[in-house]
Amino acid sequence: MINPQANNEQASGSPFRGRAPRIIIAGGGTGGHIFPAIAIANALKQQQPNTDILFVGAQGKMEMEKVPQAGYNILGLDIAGFNRSSLIKNISLPFKLIKSFFQVRTIINDFKPDAVVGVGGYSSFPVLRFAQSKGIATYIHESNSFAGKSNMMLGKKATKIFVASDGMEKFFPAEKLQITGNPVRTTIAQAKVSRREAIKFFGLDENKTTVLAVGGSLGARSINEALANSLHSFSGNNIQLIWQTGKTTAIEYKAKAEGYADVWISEFITQMEMAYAAADVVISRAGAMAVTELCVAGKPVIFVPFPFAAEDHQKVNAQHLVDKHAAFMVKDSEAADRLVNDVIKLAKDETMQQELKTNIKKLAITNADEIIAKEIISNMAP
């Protein structure tokens, strides 16, 4: 059972008069949902130190590992999303959804939150839906330029909806929208790591141009295949590689990278501030959070948008930067033929790198987490 009276000391200047405000943050599934959620939690604790925060995620998903690593408690729901590749795997879906609502009811009745924040992912919907039925204030953070169906349904009764950009009135009630940008991990937003320190962290050579390749926490096959087939091209051009493969087929790519001293490879990079600091050029998917972090880091980037994202929103995200001469883009279908050649060309063109850096930095928002936390706290105050 959860103790709703825990951490009940009054912070100096607190408007809560001797009790700790209690907030549930629900969602996860990918780093693009988890890391903004943790950033919001950190901002809430900074502005209201005695806040009790409980995360709710999906059993078996990466939030069950990453959230405790960040120092927060999390409870997991027995829930899953719709499986488009195997319809037979969806047979148990209605039962899992029903079970999750019973689990949510217990969690909310025990914890008694003052507010619930949804960041996207399977677990977000049942938690916010139940909270709304109980009259609890609910907040949504929609990081993408195209809102998901669950968030659109929840938005009708949400207290406030935080979005990354304008034009979201087509998905949500206009009067509930607040443009905040996307929260970025403090370690990235306030990074003070030097390139030399970062290169040393990865055991690489600071005299070589460094390419960072990230396809998201689950990996990107088109990016991984293009790199795996051309590792000799990097070493032949005096370029070294920091390569996050994602978990799905990490073993396969680690085997292909054996023998290349100028390749650092792992399924996941925990300290992304080090990776960004080390990188001269970046290859990345174009999810909302990847785009946001790269704007803050101010790195020359070639985006390879995931082609099956809803309404092709990753291409929209990338094109927005391409139009401002702040990034380049290679289609997923063209990655095998073009990606490595384009990356090597950019890695050798310091003038173009500087132009991209200058333009992408203009798009950076570093305090979205503070804006969101301030809004939630001010609305909860008695």
Image: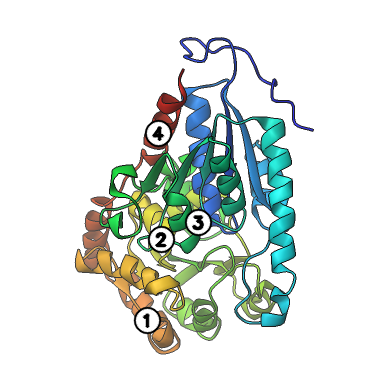
Q: Label 4, secondary structure: give it.
A: helix
User: Between 284 and 76, which is closer to the camera in this rendering?
Assistant: 76
The residue beneath circle 1 is: 331
Mark identifier at residue 32: 3
Dividing the image into 4 quarters, which one contains the N terminus? top right
Up-down relation of residue 241 to residue 377 (above or below): below
Upstream in sequence: badge 1 or badge 2: 2
Mark identifier at residue 64: none
The residue beneath circle 4 is: 370
Residue at 71 percent across and 44 percent down: it is: 75
Query: Please, what is the three-letter code of the amino acid marked with disc 1?
Result: Lys
Q: Nearer the viewer, mark 2 or mark 4?
A: 2
Upstream in sequence: badge 3 or badge 4: 3
- Please identify the residue farthest to the right as the structure is shown: 1
Q: Label 3, secondary structure: give it.
A: helix
Residue at 56 percent across and 42 percent down: it is: 133
